[in-house]
Structures are given as C-alpha cells and as structure tokens.
Amino acid sequence: MDVKLIQERRVILGNWGNLRGNHKRKLRRNANCCVAVLTGAAERGGNEETRNLNAVYRDNWFDKLAIDHLSEAVQATSGWRSEKSGYESLVEVATMASRNLNQIKQREAMIEALQRAFPRPILSLIRTLLPQSKFAREYFAAFTTVFFAWLVGPCEVKESELNGRRERNVVHIHKCRFLEQTNCVGMCINLCKFPTQEFIKDSLGMPVSMTPNFDDMSCEMKFGEDPPASIEDPALNQPCYKLCKKKEKHMIETN
C-alpha cells in the first residue's frame, strides 16, 4: 500500500527578519510535522478519502502478544505463513486466505483459528458461569471494549433496547482496524463478521449480531440479538471498495 505523509507547514509571516538566529533555526526544525497518513486512493481524491485516512496504532506489550497469538492461530489453520510481525502479519495471512480459499473455507479456517486461540475449557467455564442474562450481555460488551481494542480499534459500550428494556449490550467500534487495514468487504464478512458471530454463539452460548457500516468503517456488535440468516444478510449485497482487487458483491456460497 502506498503511503504518503501529509505535512503541515508552518509559515512565520511578518517580522521574520527581526528574529534571532537560534530562534530561526528552531522554527525551521519544527516547520514540518506529520498530521495524517493517507493511502494511494486518498491521494487521488474521490469518495474514499475519509475511509483511507488510516489511524496510527501504538500497540503495548499485551496488544502485541494478543496479535501474535491470533496471527499464529490463523497461520496454523489457513496453511499460509507470514514473515511479517505484529498486525501486518495478521492482515497478510488473512489476505492470503481470502485469495486462495472460497467463502466457506475462509469461515471454517477462521472459526478453527479462534478455537485454537481461546482454550475450550475457559470458554466452557464462562458459558457455565454466565448464562444468557442482562448481566452477561452487558459484561460481554464491556469486556470486548477493554480487551479487544487491539483487534478492532477504539470502541465503546452503548445502550439498545432488547426485550422491551434498555441495556448496555452494544459495542460501537468507531473505525474497525481490521476493515481499515484490509480494505476489503469480503474479508470483513468472511473472516470476521460471520466467523465471530458463529464462534461466540457456539462457544459462549451468546447470540451476537455484527452490523458493519462500510461507509465509515464503523461496526456495532449487539449481544443478545440473533444475526440475520446468512443468505438474507444485507452485508452480502455490499460491493467492495475501489481499491479491492476482487471488486465484487459477496453473495453466499452453498458448497
């Protein structure tokens, strides 16, 4: 991906000639500063400029450990290896899987990777201790914002109405890190949305519906709500971004 640093140039007008030499040197050193990172599409302008203003992440030791752990799990189940490190390795192996596996195989590989990444005894214990309830739904939402920001980016808990009452059971992801880095609707659907919904339901007994917004790359996870049937999910009718090499609608595969 081509990256261009947009620089902000500070110009001192007026009495430049009256400034002392050391002040001039200091101003020259500080004249340029990076204020954003844009991909190639944003350089060319168009509707994708906002989507391609990529956030800069400073992963701490826990983030790096979690990213490497998940990346290794995806590499083990997909059959592809990445020589990169950090989030780049996760994106690279996910990209290889999306290009070489059909939709069903992609989802199966990601579900298996999640099963490898999260030990079954721990998941079974959580399922036993937290049967579906208002407390469990709100707990899962809060837990996601604290411990999975390394995967999806900054997020917060929001309220929604479920069964006629208000609950804080929704995770609002401001701009999904995975979608932002892959820039592919198909990878979002087949390597994140569908596998995550199925994995959480099967392993924790908690239905969750994930609704990505492909215009601003945000997403909402609503715990306690069943997602639409796969063949009826509106996300499948979403064409991919201009930068995506597949440039297709992501209809469901049945075999």
Image (cartoon, grey):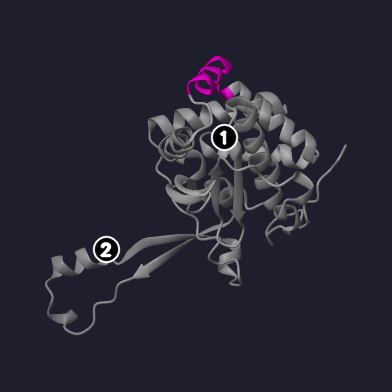
Q: Residues within 10 Å of mark 2 (few under 14, many from 20)?
A: few
For disc 2, the marked residue is: 30
Residue type at tag 1: Lys
- The stretch drawn in magenta includes residue 63: no
In the displayed structure, would residue 25 be above or below residue 206?
Answer: below
- The stretch drawn in magenta includes residue 119: yes
Residue 127, given in percent of the width and then of the height, sits at 54, 23
Identity of the residue drawn at 39% across and 30% down: 61
In front of the other: 154 or 227: 227
In the displayed structure, would residue 104 be above or below residue 46?
Answer: above
Q: Quadrant of the C terminus?
A: top right
Distance Cα–Cα, label 2 vs label 1:
33 Å
Residue type at tag 2: Asn
Label total for image? 2
Residue 60, given in percent of the width and then of the height, sits at 38, 35
**237 left or right of 27 in image:** right
For disc 1, the marked residue is: 84
Snapshot quadrant of residue 39: bottom right
In the displayed structure, would residue 7 be above or below residue 63?
Answer: below
In the displayed structure, would residue 154 be above or below residue 112?
Answer: below
In front of the other: 248 or 22: 248
Snapshot quadrant of residue 199: top right
User: Which label's residue is closer to the chain start, 2 or 1?
Assistant: 2
- Can residue 36 be seen here? The reply is yes
- Can residue 82 be seen here? The reply is no
Give the residues drawn in magenta, as a range: 117-129
Which of label 2 and label 1 is nearer to you? Answer: 1
Q: Residues within 10 Å of mark 1 (few under 14, many from 20)?
A: few
Snapshot quadrant of residue 124: top right
In front of the other: 72 or 222: 222
* Callout 1 secondary element: loop
* Callout 2 secondary element: loop
